[in-house]
Image (tube, helix red, strand yellow):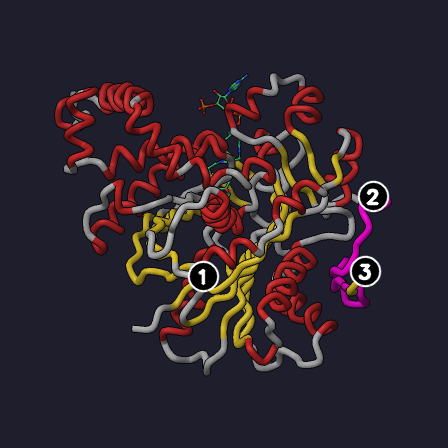
Amino acid sequence: MTAVGIDAMEIWTGKLKLDLAETFAPAQGDDPGKYTKGLGLRASSFPDVYEDIVTMGANAAHRLMERKGLTPEDIGRIDVATESAFDNSKPVSTYIAGCLEQVYDENFHHANKGERKFACISGTQSLDDAYNWIRAGRNRGRAALVIATDTALYARDDPGEATQGAGAVAMLVDEDPNLVELSTEQGYGSADETDFLKPNQQFPSVDGKRSVNVYLARMREALEDFAEVAGDIHPGDYEMIPFHTPFPGMVRKAAALGYRHIIRGTDVGDLMAEEIGRQPMRSDFETDDEFHAAIKEYTDALTETERYQDWYANSIEPTLEISREVGNWYTGSVHIARAAGLKHARENGLDLDEARLLVASYGSGAQAEVHAETVVPGWEEEIGALDIDEQVRNRYDLSFAEYEQVHDVHNHETETDVEEFTAPENEFAFDGWGRMGERKYRYVE
Ligand code: HMG
């Protein structure tokens, strides 16, 4: 069977930065440690006044097409995953195709375009759609462009405000990929939940503490479901595990749960039992509360072991390096986690040819999905082409008063006129409104 997967990717961050320790924490009267250590975030990316989900997505896609020497004729499908859409009918992919058509001689009239919605997991679902389209032989030799783009803003003073972010990831899905091959096997954990939602409103209604538990519950189900189809998982099977990362502290919890789960019945589980005892079983306790207290105690002991900490340092920590600087990108979040892990491997001379990744996606509402990926030769060159460090470094550092203005600019319910903080150059920029309320864009040389 021909390999299908991600051939190349590009990342585009919003051009502004909110420093959480230096700028946000003092304004909130909080200890910076809550953000840097507790949530694990140093900064958030924000869109400048001329940026939005279309410009960021189109800029990432344009850069990808240029780097790979592609023209619209090479692309048969454009799928956009977002939960920040501004139109209930016209998909963001049409806007992005319209932008790209400004800079290419050909058009995308032949391409199937859509928009996927299921909170943060829709980025991964769009990859699935592209994968299935190619596997079904409907692609006529063309590749799919999958774009995950979001302005992940919360209402001011919402506890989620510290986890905001904005950026886009463009991925080219094709046969014989140069980055990762996707596994056929997938595991799901899906339930009707009201942990985080946007019922016809721009900013989410969030039950923050509950959302953390829902994430963990669905992730456990997805891992179990994946093991049913792919066989038992051993911690040594996967070089890295990129998780959906709303903030790194969430992944700290998810990784402990995942590790607890995957060492059961393995040699690692036996060694761990010698060190800290066997994992608590529900049947050994009379009440759920007693069981949960025992699980918490066991997990605390587990995460203190050298064996766990080594595994975490190698398999999880590298995947968090971009997220710490940019915050939650919703649909793009798990995809920047994969990129961060591969980037770390490249920078540290690790040989990942044929190595396996376990990719753990999540979307509120709620669904988790787990699948495996095989890193393919060529990955180093692809990852080496990313300039995300430079983009992150070049962001304009907002003062708190400027942050408040920018938040208002992007709030659909306020009308604020603020000068741009950075100057667009060789990129798409928002250019005002059309006669039917549509957004207009132009390419700025
Ligand atoms: P909060 O309640 O303000 O924070 O917001 P907290 O008091 O729970 O503190 C956070 C952590 O910092 C805690 O660590 C504190 O102990 C620690 P934990 O106990 O959890 O390990 N802490 C400190 N550490 C060091 N020094 C200090 C200090 N002070 C405190 N001085 C909350 C947390 C998650 C509720 C909030 O950020 C929120 O509502 N976020 C939005 C929802 C969210 O991200 N949920 C995550 C799971 S759902 C998901 O991932 C889906 C999502 O991406 C959306 C989608 O799918 O579309 C959100």
> Decide: marks 1, 3 in contact (CB < 8 A)?
no
Q: Distance between the residues labelled 2 and 3?
A: 15 Å
Q: Measured from the top left, where is residue 445 in percent x and y?
A: 81, 63
Q: Name the residue under label 3.
A: 431
Q: Which of marks 1 and 3 is nearer the N terminus?
A: 1
Q: Give the range drawn in magenta.
A: 419-441
Task: Give the image quarter of residue 322.
Answer: top right
- Residue 45 versus residue 441 in the image, above or below: above
Q: What residue type is labelled 1?
A: Gly
Q: Measured from the top left, where is residue 147 in percent x and y?
A: 56, 60
Q: Distance between the residues labelled 1 and 3?
A: 38 Å
Marker disc for residue 378? 1
Q: Is residue 137 left or right of residue 440?
A: left
Who's the residue at 77% across and 58% down the image? 430
Q: Can residue 91 be seen in this view?
A: no
Marker disc for residue 416? 2
Tally of marks: 3
Q: Which of marks 2 and 3 is nearer the N terminus?
A: 2
Q: Is mark 3 on a helix, strand or loop?
A: strand
